[in-house]
Image (spheres, rainbow, N blue to C red):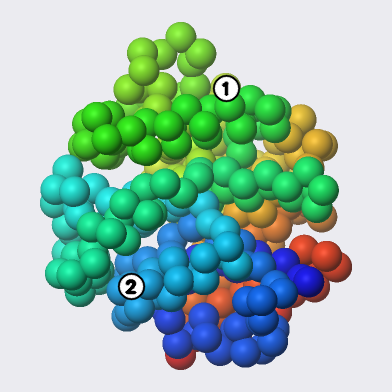
Amino acid sequence: MSTYAIGDVQGCYTTLIDLLALIKFNPAQDQLWFAGDLINRGPDSLTTLRFIKNLGTAARLVLGNHDLHFLAACYQAAPTRPKDTFQSLLAATDSIELADWLRQQPLLIYDAEKNYCMTHAGIPHLWNLEQAQTYAQEVEAVLRNPKLYPDFLTQMYDKQPDCWDENLPPMARYRIITHYFTRMRYIRPNGQLDFKNKDAPISLTIPQSDYLPWFSYPSLAQQQTRIIFGHWATLMGHTQSNRIFGLDTGCVWGERLTALRLEDEKIFSCSAQ
């Protein structure tokens, strides 16, 4: 049995199938971990989401910002945007069924035996692994609660707060937790997020400003486990730590879709189709 973590698919179904052929994926024996952003911006969100759902226990995933945006649109908690490409998914007869399934998925996966943790955007240096797990579970419980998720999905777009505070009121607390797990790239030492800069750093060791890539800071979580993330396509997988694996290699932008075999850290990738 092999376990493969796969970067942001974003509706690029044909490339995903090519990648699974390359790794000789066998759903009876192997397991796939998807690093979030399964859908949107690519050509076939509906087929992609149906395919991954139908894999059953052969697939695990964490939610990304595009997945959460689809949920908000599907449940009419927020409007679609001009660049969204999941219209066929919204119009599908099984749209609500797919959304209800997606809403049950986690923000964080941790496998103690394999010694890997995965979130869509990473783990801020402010938190150790146990804190990250606890905070992820708080938001997961809200998303799974039929009485709570509509209000959360309506309010999750607000960029404030942009910094962690243990004493935040509940909705603000859920929002900043979600920002860290699904939107984080650059961060200040105090935990403040930069929502604007999506570029790769010129250097991973020389600061461009007082914001640094989240993985640049000493972190208990990084010492405790290896961390897999997606979200940051311009990095093209490059980080400064051999315990941090960035898997978004820009498939939806015409680059590559990448998989990491957890057992031996071997990388596989396919050109976008």
Q: Which element carries disc 1, helix, strand or loop? A: loop
Q: Position of residue 15 (x, y in %)?
A: 50, 85
Label 2 residue SS: helix
- Image quarter (top left, top right, bottom left or bottom right) of the N terminus: bottom right
Q: Examine the image and state in which quarter residue 108 appears.
A: top right
Residue 119 in the image: above or below residue 96:
above
Location of residue 143 in the rendering, given as x and y in whole percent from the top left corner = 36, 38
Residue 223 in the image: state x and y as whole percent.
82, 37
The reply to whether residue 177 is in sight is yes
Q: Position of residue 122 (x, y in %)?
A: 59, 45
- The residue depicted at 66 percent of the width and 54 percent of the height is 228
Report the disc number at residue 51. none
Q: CA distance from mark 2 to mark 1?
A: 37 Å
Compare residues 74 and 15 and report the one nearer the observer.
74
Crowd rating for badge 1 (residues with CA inside 10 Å; few <14, some 14–19, many 20+): few
* Residue at x-position 33% and y-position 73%: 45
- Seen in the picture, residue 186 relative to 73 is either above or below; the reply is above
* Side of 242 relative to 34 (left or right): right
Give the quarter of the image for residue 11: bottom left
Mark 2 belongs to which amino acid? Ser
Residue denoted by label 1 = 190
Residue designated by label 2? 45
- Residue positioned 61% across, 32% down in the render: 133
Which amino acid lies under the numbered mark 1 shown in the image of this protein?
Asn
Q: Residue at x 28, y 59 (%)?
A: 97
**First in residue order: circle 2 vs circle 1:** 2
Q: Are marks 2 and 1 in contact (CB under 8 Å)?
A: no
Give the label, 2 or 1, closer to the camera: 2
